[in-house]
Image (tube, rainbow, N blue to C red):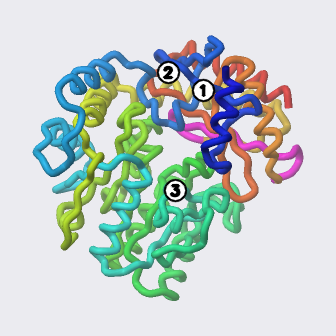
Amino acid sequence: MTRDLFGRHRAVLPDWLALYYEDPLEITHGEGRHVWDAAGNKYLDFFGGILTTMTAHALPEVTKAVSEQAGRIIHSSTLYLNRPMVELAERVAQVSAIPDARVFFTTSGTEANDTALLLATAHRRSNTVLAMRNSYHGRSFSSVGITGNRGWSPTSLSPLQTLYVHGGVRTRGPYAHLDDRDFIDACVADLKDLLGHTRPPAALIAEPVQGVGGFTSPPDGLYAAFREVLHERGILWIADEVQTGWGRTGEHFWGWQAHGRGGPPDIVTFAKGIGNGMSVGGVIARAEIMNCLDANSISTFGGTQVTMAAGLANLTYLLEHDLQGNARRVGGMLIERLRAVAAQVPHVREVRGRGLMIGIELARPGTDEAAPEAASTVLEEARAGGLLIGKGGGHSTSVLRVAPPLSLTVAEAEEGAAILERALRSV
C-alpha cells in the first residue's frame, strides 16, 4: 500500500518535494510522543513534524478544542470579529515581552516572515535587509530572497537587496578560532563595516538558533551587541522564532532572550509549535510598526476560528504544565547523554543545542568535511530501530536534528538516546 502511494505521489506532486527515507514512510496516527505507520510499526518521534508537534500528538485538550470549535464554526475570515483570535492574541501579546504589542496571525512561518518584511520595509521605507549566513526563513519569493542557505534557495531573484552578516554559526567560518568575546567583537565590526557600504537597511532578520541550518547559534549576547549598532541607526531587529519560540530552548521562553540585554526585538515571528500541527503562524510588533501600513490588508485563513482554538488550548497546556522547564531538564540530560556517545563515534564532529533543540553534526573522521552519506545512514538506522529524527545543515555541513515534543519523559529520552547511539555506531 505504501509503495502504491509512493508511485501516486511521484505521478502528481513536484520532483523537488523531498521525502525522507529510501522506502518513504506514511504516518497514519500518533499519541503522546509516538507515531505509527501504515504497516503498524510504532516510532518514538524525535522530530515532531519539523518541530510542529510541540506538546504531544493527539493532545486531548487540543483535539477537544478543535472538535468543539469545528462543531460551531470553522472559518469566517478576519473581516468579522473573532473571539478565539482575540483571546489567543491577548495571550501571545502578554507573553511576548514586547511593549504595546499587536499580533497578526498567518497560516505559516513563511507567511509570518513575509509579513514582517512588509512591515519593516514599509516602516523604514527601505528594501535593503540584513540577514545571517546559513539562515532559513521560508519558501515564498521574499523569504527565499533573505535565506542564506543555498540548499533552500532556488532563485537569486528577489524584491529585496539582501546583505549577509557573520555570526550565526559559532564553530565554522573565519571567526571560529576566536573565543566568544572576540567572536562577538569581530561580528560586530563586520556589521559596522557592512553598514558603511550600503543604503540604510530596513531590518536585520535572524533566527536565535538556526533551524534548517543545523541548530547552530552564536554566543549568547551577539544579537544584543548587534541591537546596539542597529538601534543607533533606526534599523529594526526581527527575531524569527518559528522554531525557537514557546520554550523549546528550555533556558528561555523565546530564543531572543539569550540576547535580551538591549530589550526585546522590534518584531517577532512565530509558527510551527503554537498550533501543535494546526496551521498557525504570526507576527508580534510594537503598535507603531504594526500599524504603519497605509493600504488594506486582511488574512483569509490566518486567525481562522478552529486554528485559534487549537493554539489557545495548546499554549494554555504548555504554560500550565511548565513544558519549558521540562525541555530544560530532559533536554539537558539528553544532550549530555548524546555527547557521551559522540565522544566514542569518530563521525561526530559536534553535539550542540539547548533544551529540546539538539543538533549532531557529522563529518568525515579526522576532518571538518561534511558526511551527508553518514547522516543518511543514521537516519535510516534510527528509523529501523523505531526512532524518527531530522536532517539539516548549511554550507558543507551535515547535521542530524533532534527536536521531540516538549512533554518528552526521561524514560523516552533514554530510549531515544539508546536507539540513536546504535544508529551512530553503525556508520
| Badge 3: residue crowd in 10 Å (few <14, some 14–19, many ≥20) | some
Quadrant for the C terminus in the image: top right
The stretch in magenta equals: 353-368
Q: Could you say where residue 233 lies in the image, as x and y percent from the top left?
A: 35, 80
C-alpha distance separating marks 3 and 2: 30 Å
Q: The disc labelled 2 sits on which kind of residue?
A: Leu
Residue 176 circle label: none
- Say whether residue 367 is magenta: yes
Left or right, 389 with reference to 195: right
The residue tagged 1 is 334
Residue 294 colored magenta? no
N-terminal-most mark, 3 or 2: 3
Looking at the rendered structure, which numbered label has been put on residue 139?
3
Q: Residues within 10 Å of mark 2 (few under 14, many from 20)?
A: many
Q: Helix, strand or loop at disc 1?
A: helix
Viewer-proximal residue among 263 and 364: 364
Disc number for residue 408: 2
Say if mark 1 contacts mark 2, CB within 8 Å. yes
**Image coords of residue 420 (percent x, y):** 71, 25
Instruction: State the residue at coordinates (50%, 18%).
Output: 30
What's under tag 1, amino acid-wise? Leu
Numbered-mark total = 3
Q: Nearer the viewer, residue 181 or 60?
A: 60
Q: Position of residue 332 (x, y in %)?
A: 55, 30
Mark 1 vs mark 2: give the one in front: 2
Question: Of label 1 and label 2, which has the lower sequence position?
Answer: 1
Q: Nearer the viewer, mark 3 or mark 2?
A: 3
Residue 259 visible in the shown view: no
Q: Residues within 10 Å of mark 1 (few under 14, many from 20)?
A: many
Q: Would you identify the image quadrant in which residue 39 lies? A: top right
Whether residue 318 is visible to the viewer of this picture, yes or no, is: yes
Task: Please give the name of the residue rendered at 31% of the width and 56% of the height, measured from the top-left corner.
Answer: 264
